[in-house]
Amino acid sequence: DTAVSQTPKYLVTQMGNDKSIKCEQNLGHDTMYWYKQDSKKFLKIMFSYNNKELIINETVPNRFSPKSPDKAHLNLHINSLELGDSAVYFCASSQGFGTGELFFGEGSRLTVL
Amino acid sequence: KQEVTQIPAALSVPEGENLVLNCSFTDSAIYNLQWFRQDPGKGLTSLLLIQSSQREQTSGRLNASLDKSSGRSTLYIAASQPGDSATYLCAVRPSSGSRLTFGEGTQLTVNP
């Protein structure tokens, strides 16, 4: 059973399009995150939700909008995609905001042409 | 602002060797520190989580130590195997707030 699953794993799209990445965790955790890993492999947090409430919202263009329909799901919608959005996006979850061990999904590689 | 540095950036060793990966952080006010491994094209797998009150954690051939006062953590891998080849990342969680700060990782290659 996959603990944190993301779809799609690969996404290739044109500039200007809108796309979504979905994430689900079956660990019963109350906190979920989106991270971005750039071409230099550096990981940076984008958003964090605790019990469906937005807790962390880093300096991310407002073209990126997270949505958490329930504690087990955190989706990422990106509008008007730009070349610089190309990266690997990782979903993660933990139990306890700010305290628990982090578990990551396998990542969604987004390529904007 | 917390900064996390991992040295070396890359390491290549023969199979069977014991090795140490280093992680240093600038702000010692941490809640915990977590070590991950990342295989190419894959997500991060949690290896060890050390709380700020702990000095070390062990899992199999892995041992992680934490020295908060000096801002350092080490990951010791005993009897390395080719399957250990991956990028190893450390991440620090501050004592206030929840933003993990990641290091840039050490890319380990264990040669058969």
Image (spheres, helix red, strand yellow):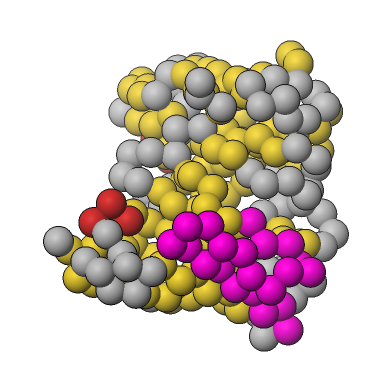
Extreme residue in the top direction: A69
In which image quadrant can residue B48 be found? bottom right
Residue at image point 53% right, 57% down: B59
In which image quadrant can residue A8 be found? top left
B56 within the magenta span:
yes
Residue at image point 45% right, 33% down: A107
The number of discs equals 0
- Return the residue nearer the eye: B111 or A79: B111
Q: Is residue B84 left or right of residue A18?
A: left
- Return the residue nearer the eye: B100 or A19: B100
In which image quadrant can residue A69 be found? top right
B73 within the magenta span:
no
- Give residue B89's position: percent from left, percent from top: 48, 59
Residue at image point 33% right, 62% down: B107
Residue range (magenta) = B49-69
Which SS does the magenta portion mostly show? Answer: strand
- Return the residue nearer the eye: B4 or A24: A24
- Give residue A70's position: percent from left, percent from top: 76, 16
- Give residue A45's position: percent from left, percent from top: 62, 46
Q: Is residue B50 above or below residue A45?
A: below
Q: Is residue A63 above or below residue B101?
A: above
Residue at image point 27% right, 59% down: B81
Quadrant the N terminus of chain B occupies: bottom right
Task: Determine if residue A33 is in view.
Answer: yes
Extreme residue in the left direction: B112
Q: Is residue A63 left or right of residue B28?
A: left
Quadrant the C terminus of chain B occupies: bottom left
Q: Is residue B18 above or below residue A34?
A: below
